[in-house]
Amino acid sequence: MRKNTLSRRAVLAAGLLIGGVMACGQASANDKTFVIGVAMPFQTNSWQKGFFASAKYAAEQLNASGKKVELKIVDAGGDAQTQIQQINNLTLQGVDFIIIEPLSDTALNGAVDNAVAAGIPVLATGTGGITNPKAIELQNDFKTLGDKYVKLITDRVGTKGTAIMIRGLAGNAAEQTIQDSYTRALAKYPDIKVVSTVYGDWNQSVAQQHVTTILPTLPPKVDIIFSQGEAAFGAAQAFLAAGREVPMQVYGFSGTDVNLLIKLNEKSGYDSVAMNTDPGVGGMAVNVAVAKLSGEPVPMTMEAPVPVLSVAQLKADHGNLADSDILWLKYSYDWTLKNIIGKK
Amino acid sequence: MTRKAQFAVGSVTLMSTNVGVKIWRNLLRKSWAGALAGVVLLWVIAGLVTGELSWSFLIANATIAGLFALAGTAQMAVLASGSGNIDLSLPYVVTFSAYVMSAGVLGQDNVAGSVLLSVLVGALTGAVNVALIVRLRIPAIVATLASGYILYSLTVSIQNWPSKPVGGMFEAMLRARFAGLTGVLIVAALILAVVGVLLSRTVFGLQFHAMGQNAEVARLAGVRRGWVLLGTFVLAGVLEALLGVLLATYQGGVSADLGRAYLLGSVAAVVIGGTRPTGGVTSVFGTAVGALVLTLAQSDLILLNFGIGTQYVIQGLIVLSTVCLVAARSPDRR
């Protein structure tokens, strides 16, 4: 008897809930509260934490300026199948916009088709692009990255010297793209000799191991370290542990990198820069979503900048970054409109 | 018998050759003989490539190998404790204790306290593993994976705490050089020596080997298997925690994927070192040499400018051929 009442109540409650949700959906359309689904791949590394923080920051700023934005953040735990389901769920829930950090460049195409067919624009950013042309792309330009990167180094040590190369994760498509752009850029500097190439697996610890073991076989003076993400700190530590000077290299945005660069600079005047794909692209993507939903003409492909910060800037703005944190930049809505969406 | 007698009455020169042969035979009979030969070969190859037989190259590789040997020895103990046992929680214990060190869970400068806490967590993980395996009869491969995941989520939760390099005296000591050797290598060697004595010269060591060779016979002989298994997993957990402590301090920074490289490396070092993966025979020295073979092979392949695909293939072949050799030499071929 009592059970029966309970279940009746449950049905009633569920009915009310569904009705409520539907009512909310209608209300939000009228009040223009933009519900933006954010499909994150995983949240376990500092870059993703920065992305998350910057997306939330952008939403807060937009809310403060009078636009109503609500984020629905989901985390696929590193699994592309889960991400497909999450995108389908967001579509069924009737969100207004979906931002995806794709775990696969092809597997999500169907889910994206569903969303776009339901009238929900989809934007891919962060971990990479997808091959479905219906998705808006906000990506780093890896093709010109190499030129910029190599120039930062040659501006400091000249166009001659001995270098070691630390690549990323073997077999990864993005790794190959970045490496190709380095190779093209380096072709212009025949006097820079890469004497050894190791794979750091995009893992500080692995990069440090490999550099440590080959270090005694390298010439006494190594001028340059070229590296992909997560390697600069480990490589520098390998040189420091062996009692050698740290060669010129470009650092990343992680707390370990930034703090080491500041420390080296204070100790000996060592001068370099930090350059990274910016986790702040999360906030930028939220701004783009709101622009699109507000009726601004948003192009299908946009380019996210790869910021470069000098030691002076790092000291001034990011001097108290914890080792476990990552630096990300803040982009306002108006800045995004002008520099990302309006850029031709 | 007769042959021995003939030698005995032979000339002095014959006697001495005989002794020499005996030493060589003993050496060759050791499970780690092949690995040691591998080390020499790989060192010479590196020497040929670079044009000099560099002592510092060997020490640099030994320094990294010392760290791998800690992971290898932990895995060796678990592998040898009985067929089917493996510790998949290894990378997570390593990473977690590294975070305990550098996130200053007990305050940033409390090095001794942090080391103690790390070791405690390692021991506790080992104990939980054994509880799952013995009490709930969950296979080790599942139990250790489960406890590893729990530890991983703990790592993720303390990952947000502001961390900084351990630094100070401890880091200086690990990076210092004593008679050409690095501090971290000496510390790793001392830890391994203690484990070596524990496994070969104590009652626990005897019971541990008896259990690995034949669990049922060991039980009939009065070995309390649950307790020996507890000792084994706690030992492994403590070694993994110490590895995390050393890594966090020596490397100067931590990341969530710190321990990842050590899981496969640990198994490979054990196998190359001549330990039979089916249990019962162990050698801490062999595992250490196995780890050195792995790091030297990696360095040689980099020096020879092999493509990354070739590097993986050759590394795989090294492990595979050692397993074949060990299997061919073991008496109980199936």
Image (cartoon, coloured by chain):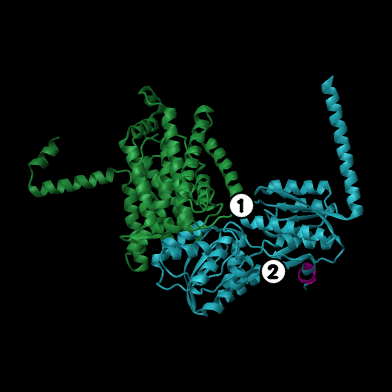
Q: Please give the letter of the chain rendered in cyan.
A: A
Counting from the top left corner in percent of width and height, residue B138 is at 54, 31
Name the secondary structure under disc 2. Answer: loop
Magenta stretch prevailing secondary structure: helix
Is A212 situated left or right of A92 in this image?
left
For disc 1, the neighbor class at 10 Å (few under 14, some 14 to 19, many from 20) is some
Residue A84's disc number: none
Counting from the top left corner in percent of width and height, residue B223 is at 38, 26
In this view, the residue in front, B257 or A273, is A273
Quarter of the rendering containing residue A189: bottom right
In this view, the residue in front, B166 or B324, is B166
Counting from the top left corner in percent of width and height, residue B193 is at 33, 45
Quarter of the rendering containing residue B76: top left
Q: How far apart are labels 2 and 1 at the CA level?
A: 27 Å
Is A317 situated left or right of B299 in this image?
right
For the residue marked with disc 2, what is the amino acid?
Answer: Pro
Residue B160's disc number: 1
Q: Chain of mark 1?
A: B
What range is drawn magenta here?
A336-342
Residue A305's disc number: 2
For disc 2, the neighbor class at 10 Å (few under 14, some 14 to 19, many from 20) is some
Q: Please give the letter of the chain rendered in green.
A: B
Is B306 situated left or right of A42 in this image?
left
For the point 34% across and 38% down, the residue is B198
